[in-house]
Image (cartoon, rainbow, N blue to C red):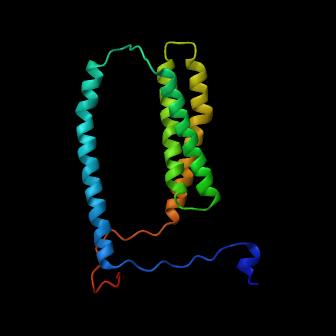
């Protein structure tokens, strides 16, 4: 037995270098994704302004229980997927943890903003400050740490004489 197998550490093998065609495809998909997100973000600005001026200040909700239970089920699923993928050391843990973090931030926002003007606002704020937001921060911090370990294609296109091929 070698030292790595005695300690339970797996050796990481280096992935084969991507071909120039693969790099070009990745860059093209990245560019198209960024362009789509720019269009969506710009389009969302006037929509948000319109909602700010036209939505009623109060609204009677008909499916309150279904909405909140469904949201919490989604949050539980994201956390469970994070645990499952983390336990199995699968790289999909990054997506699951990020989804759980985003849902935690949304949960904190909705809990506090919908409790404003009621006696529940203090409990909602305490839960957000001491539980939901710190857990979301922790998950995002861990995801960024995992991402920093990954190797990514360079931003510059590979050329035949640059040695990046």
| Residue for point 34% across, 79% down | 19
Establish if 27 lies above or below 86: below
Percent of width and height locating residue 149: 52, 65
**Looking at the image, residue 119 lies above or below residue 148:** above
Point 50% across, 60% down: residue:
147
Instruction: Tell me where residue 55 sits by quadrant.
Output: top left
Q: How many marks can you see?
A: 0
Taking depth in this image into account, of 165 and 93 the one nearest to the observer is: 93
Residue 54, relative to residue 88: is it above or below? above
Residue 85, given in percent of the width and then of the height, sits at 59, 56
Where is residue 7 shown, x and y percent of the image?
75, 73
The x, y position of residue 38, in whole percent, is 26, 47
37 relative to 106, above or below: below
In the rendered image, the quadrant that contains the C terminus is: bottom left
Residue under the image location 55 percent in, 51 percent down: 141
Kindly tell me whether residue 137 is visible in this rendering. no
The residue shown at (24%, 41%) is: 42
Front residue of 24/69: it is: 69
Q: Residue furthest bottom?
A: 161
Residue 145 appears in the picture as rendered: yes
Q: Quadrant of residue 1?
A: bottom right
- In the picture, residue 155 is in which quadrant? bottom left
Going by the image, does 48 lie left or right of 102? Answer: left
């Amino acid at each position: 037995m070698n030292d790595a197998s005695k300690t339970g550490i797996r050796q990481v093998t280096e992935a084969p270098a991507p071909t120039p065609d693969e790099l070009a495809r990745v860059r093209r998909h990245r560019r198209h994704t960024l362009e789509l997100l720019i269009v969506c973000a710009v389009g969302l600005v006037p929509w948000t302004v319109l909602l700010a001026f036209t939505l009623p200040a109060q609204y009677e909700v008909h499916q309150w229980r279904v909405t909140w239970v469904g949201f919490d089920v989604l949050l539980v699923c994201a956390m469970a997927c994070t645990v499952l993928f983390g336990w199995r050391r699968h790289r999909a843990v990054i997506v699951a943890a990020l989804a759980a973090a985003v849902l935690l931030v949304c949960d904190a926002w909705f809990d506090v903003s919908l409790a404003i003007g009621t006696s529940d606002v203090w409990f909602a704020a305490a839960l957000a400050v001491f539980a939901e937001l710190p857990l979301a921060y922790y998950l995002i911090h861990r995801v960024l740490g995992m991402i920093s370990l990954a190797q990514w294609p360079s931003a510059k296109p590979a050329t035949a004489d640059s040695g990046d091929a």
